Image (cartoon, rainbow, N blue to C red):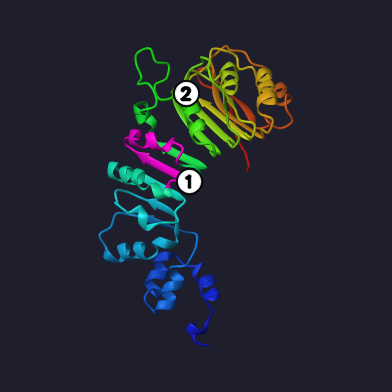
């Protein structure tokens, strides 16, 4: 049997086991039928590095119509319009030109489901990313959050600011602007315990992580948080703080908050510190408060006498 006598379905099945680079080197240009099959492949991903090699550039262009996931490794200036099907985009370290090009590439905003960006300055991007244009966005990861105080929709930090990088208004702005968001992780340098005047209802958020430098997490802060956001579908809540709290962490109040505000919560993770001498109930009593939420909770006395309360050994 000659190779060309095989049906397209067999070629597609074979090609699924090969990388785009191998497919391009071995099969591209054999004939127009093979070229058409190669360019009809679905759900392919590609990593793009800066390169002046014509073969690599030509390969990227040849397979562009098949790509749904694009990972741009450095300053390579690529035209996103060549990738009409992308729904996942990662910039390992985006330049200003790359961010400007992404913002101008409005054709892909509506269908993008995953966005991961690291950059020296995110202020240019944030103005657009938290808008109503990203209707399909399920997960957004923005690294180098130091630049976020420059966001045009929030006040600049001043000497009497409670928040250096973000506050509750930042959280509410994200939830309000991204109605389909399912997973949100925030790193906050300083958290405000003041109540908010508005309440946001978000029906899709399922995973929430908030890390903060100061102050230490308290159940009062969690009470205020979930009085300001209503997330009935939340199934995972994770908190981390790097400053020891002088206030006992009240797990009895915490479970009351969870029962009242988070009816679908399946997973609670934490890594928090209590100052030396701050009392808390014993670990056995905490675990008895709920049938599974606190099963992975652990205590660890630090060298300076602080108590670390953390979770570990989770299996998805």
Name the element at disc 1: strand
Look at the picture and state if 159 lies above or below 242.
above
Visible residue check, residue 161: yes
Residue count near mark 2 (Cα–Cα under 10 Å), binned few <14, some 14–19, many ≥20: some
Residue 314 x/y as whole percent: 62, 38
Is residue 228 on the magenta stretch?
Answer: no
Residue 151 x/y as whole percent: 36, 29
Residue 223 x/y as whole percent: 60, 19
Residue 114 is labelled as 1
Q: Distance of mark 2 from mark 1, alpha carbons?
A: 23 Å
Visible residue check, residue 282: no
Q: Which residues are magenta?
A: 109-133
Tell me which residue sits at (46%, 46%) in the image: 110
Please state if 207 lies on the left or on the right of 153 as rendered. right
Ranked by sequence position, the earlier of labels 2 and 1 is: 1
Please state if 313 lies on the left or on the right of 172 as rendered. right
* Snapshot quadrant of residue 51: bottom left
């Amino acid at each position: 049997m000659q190779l060309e006598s095989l049906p397209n379905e067999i070629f597609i099945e074979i090609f699924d086991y090969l990388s785009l680079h191998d497919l391009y080197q071995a099969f591209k240009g054999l004939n127009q039928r093979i070229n058409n099959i190669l360019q009809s492949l679905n759900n392919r991903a590609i990593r793009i590095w800066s390169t002046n090699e014509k073969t690599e550039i030509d390969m990227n262009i040849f397979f562009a119509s098949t790509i749904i996931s694009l990972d741009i490794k450095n300053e390579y200036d690529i035209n996103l319009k060549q990738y009409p099907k992308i729904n996942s985009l990662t910039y390992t370290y985006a330049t200003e030109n790359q961010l400007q090009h992404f913002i101008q590439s409005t054709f892909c905003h509506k269908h993008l489901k995953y966005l991961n960006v690291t950059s020296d300055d995110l202020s240019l991007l944030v103005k657009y990313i938290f808008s109503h244009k990203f209707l399909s966005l399920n997960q957004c990861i923005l690294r180098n959050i130091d630049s976020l105080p420059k966001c045009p929709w929030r006040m600049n930090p001043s000497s009497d600011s409670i928040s250096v990088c973000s506050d509750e208004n930042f959280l509410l702005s994200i939830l309000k602007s991204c109605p389909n968001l399912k997973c949100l992780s925030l790193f906050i340098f300083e958290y405000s315990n003041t109540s908010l005047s508005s309440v946001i209802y978000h029906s899709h958020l399922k995973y929430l992580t908030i890390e903060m430098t100061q102050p230490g997490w308290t159940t009062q802060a969690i009470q205020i948080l979930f009085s300001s956001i209503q997330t009935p579908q939340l199934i995972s809540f994770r908190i981390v703080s790097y400053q020891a709290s002088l206030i006992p962490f009240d797990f009895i109040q915490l479970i009351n908050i969870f029962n009242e505000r988070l009816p679908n919560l399946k997973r609670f993770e934490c890594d928090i510190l209590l100052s030396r001498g701050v009392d808390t109930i014993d670990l056995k009593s905490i675990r008895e408060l709920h049938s599974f939420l606190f099963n992975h909770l652990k205590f660890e006395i630090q060298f300076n006498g602080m108590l670390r309360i953390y979770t570990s050994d989770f299996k998805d």
